[in-house]
Amino acid sequence: MKLRKISIVLLALLLAAMAMIPMVSAVEDTSARTRIIEQNYITKSEAVKDAQAELSRFVENGLLDMEFSGAVINPEPVEIYDINGMRLYYSFPIEDGKKRVGEVKIAASRVFGAPVISIGHGPKSFNREELNTKAAQILKQAGFTADISSARLVCYAYPKIGLIIRSSTGSNSEKELIIDAYDYSVIPESDRTSLYDSMTLETMKSGVASWEAQKTGPGVDESRAVSPRATISKTLSGFTLYSQEKTNWCAFATAKMISRWYGITRSQTQIATTVLGSDQTNQNNGATEIQMRDEFYRKSIQQGGLGKSGSNILLGSPTNLYNLIKTEIDGNRPVVINIGIQPGQSSNYHARACAGYSRDMSSGNTYFYIYDPWPVNSGSLTWERWQGGITPYTSSIFVL
């Protein structure tokens, strides 16, 4: 009996130890990922050089509008952090005189594999002071005292930007708040995601090696860094950007862009009604990829849809995505690229239209020309570097 009891105890301890192994491994992996990110931070001065070189290259290769040809990089960037507190990227304003014409986002760590995250017109600038004030007001209404000194700008769900702020009451309870930088909506935890968390440790190591191999950072001959490179590119001339009219209407705004391309005029309200019916609550929550495919893109024009019965969904960000999208753009067919947290069934994603591609034949870097309906009532237009399987693309809708 004693032997049996000892055996049972030993078995219980063994099972407990086995259960702890994945937990320990996960902690070690997180720690290793944090170390490699921070060990490969680039300084602001390094980022300035990269931003200047990339702006020159994109202009020389004819990938940016004429208004960028005389523009320069403002050397004082806005630093954007990951929701986990690590530096994510530098957002450099691109200016022509005193006029802001766009922005270039330069990765803050070499784990991204190359300096550029995106470059182009970008979203409109926002008022940081007004954002701080609004955050403090929201916290005060909830019974908390705002600590503005703790506030940081974060990318809470790429590419969306918000202000994260922490505060405490007299009882030492603490509240963390993220509000969108443009519409001041409070972002629930379920709608937050880390761009760094989309990368594995091996992907980060590969990214560092790729960055160093491309030699686009400091130490490279300046004339080489800004010289034009051979590129393969195409954009759909005449494609129109429409901003989303409500917080969760990115899919409807994207559908309006694509409808316009095919000569069909649909308002965002009409599209929302076609997909979800007239119930206002349902419309405000947005629609899933499957709902957009079945209830709009595939639905007949007579029923309020686009009549593209062959439309299909591709989940994730497969390694051949660039080639697949290139084929569509070459066929003059824009693609919906969804980015976010949950693929497939969930409406917790962000829809954008892709109407162009570019490939740097020297570095192998690939870019998609993204018509983003966010921010609300503004939108943005950028070249976004596609980073293979690590880019948090949840799905694409091929409108056929």
Image (cartoon, rainbow, N blue to C red):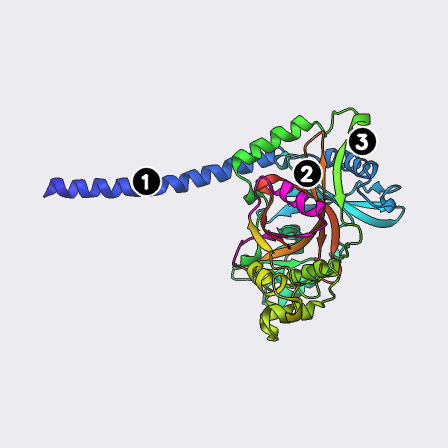
Residue named by callout 3: 226
**Where's residue 176, x and y in %?**
57, 57
For the residues bearing labels 1 and 2, Cβ distance under 8 angstroms: no
Q: Nearer the viewer, residue 164 or 257?
A: 257
Residue named by callout 2: 366
Residue drawn at 51 percent across, 62 percent down: 171
Q: Residues within 10 Å of mark 1 (few under 14, many from 20)?
A: few
Q: Residues within 10 Å of mark 2 (few under 14, many from 20)?
A: many
Q: Amino acid at mark 3?
A: Val
Pair 2/3: label in front? 2
Q: Amino acid at mark 1?
A: Met
Residue named by callout 1: 18
Q: Nearer the viewer, residue 86 or 365?
A: 365
Element type where label 1 sits in the image: helix
* Relative height, residue 58 to residue 174 (above, below): above
Q: Amino acid at mark 2?
A: Thr
* Pointer 2 or 3: first along the chain: 3
* 64 part of magenta stretch: no
Q: Nearer the viewer, residue 332 or 13?
A: 332
Position of 235 compared to 247: left or right?
right
Q: Which residues are magenta?
A: 316-345
Position of 232 compared to 145: left or right?
right
- Separation of disc 3 and disc 1 at Cα? 54 Å
**Where's residue 325, x and y in %?**
65, 45
* 328 part of magenta stretch: yes
Pair 3/1: label in front? 3
Q: Quadrant of residue 14?
A: top left
